[in-house]
Amino acid sequence: MELYNNVSYRLSEELTSRYSTSFSMSSTLFSSSVRPHIYAIYGLVRIADEVVDTYRGNDADKQLEKLRRDTMHACRQGFSTNPILHAFAITAKKFSIGEELIAPFFASMKTDLTATVFTQKEYETYIHGSAEVVGLMCLKVFTDDSELYGQLEKGAQALGSAYQKVNFLRDIQADYNQLGRVYFPGVTFEKFNDKTKRSIIKNIRKDFAQAEAAVHQLPDSARRAVYASLLYYTALLDAIEKTPTSTLLTRRVSIPKLRKLTLLLKARIS
């Protein structure tokens, strides 16, 4: 079983790495005791994203429900024939990641199968399930101290929220043209303008401000890696802010690789 466990974690790492070079770069700063478990969490997230974002079968709802059931069964049994779910189940058991975090995640993923516009309440609920609970899952891995977890809980949620909102801004063109979605409440693609963008960015910076204090209180095994991701997403938000709205609606903003490496170095020596 040890071999299967190790292979399952390696496959989770490979899956996540192939989807995000930026995440892979910052993940190198996690300690070896933390890194596999973060890949296990994001491995599950990537599979769910595939179902709701790229799978084009008319049974996507059934596929997502099967993934949810299989995930919960794996967590109860501590085993799955799906290596990605197997790794997640081991991590979930080890760090007490329960249904109170897993259920909201799948609820938000289900929303993606039907919703194209969001009210403020729906938006907040979606953000909680798609991003904040992922931040809390990671925080479970980062600390086995329940008191510290409670102190950093709000910061972890804020960081997950900020990341998700930056992604929404960066991908606004693709989300609309490929998936028909505009996540920001009261915002339409056709009427998205500079004023709207400034308001959204102001809200995201509030999330980052709340999150940063918590990041610096994380244990050394995780702090530098999370700080690197915070620096990257802050730089990405800065680039989005400098990009004309008309351009943002036609192409995806990115950070040059050299800039990413500079941010990684800054986090490494922090």
Image (cartoon, grey):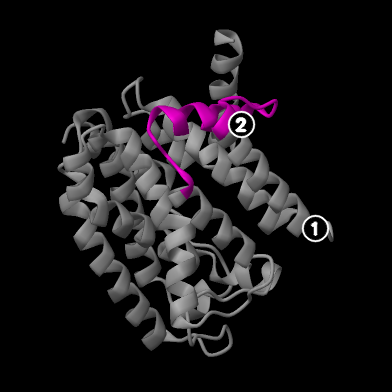
Q: State the mark number for residue 56.
A: 1
Let me know if residue 265 appears in the view: no
Q: Secondary structure at mark 1?
A: loop
Image quadrant where residue 264 sits: top left
The main secondary structure of the magenta stretch is: helix
**Residue 220 rendering spot, x and y as whole percentages:** 20, 30
Viewer-nearest residue: 25 or 121: 121
Residue 266 vertical placement versus 162 (above, below): above
What is the residue that sits farthest to the front in this orientation? Answer: 76
Q: Which residue type carries mark 1?
A: Arg
Report which residue position mark 2 lands on: 84
Viewer-nearest residue: 7 or 236: 7
Horizontal side of residue 83 vs 95, given as left or right: right
Let me know if residue 99 appears in the view: yes
- Which mark sits nearer the N-terminus, 2 or 1? 1
Instruction: Give the residue displayed 41% in from the left and 34% down from the top.
Output: 25
Q: Which residue type carries mark 2?
A: Ile
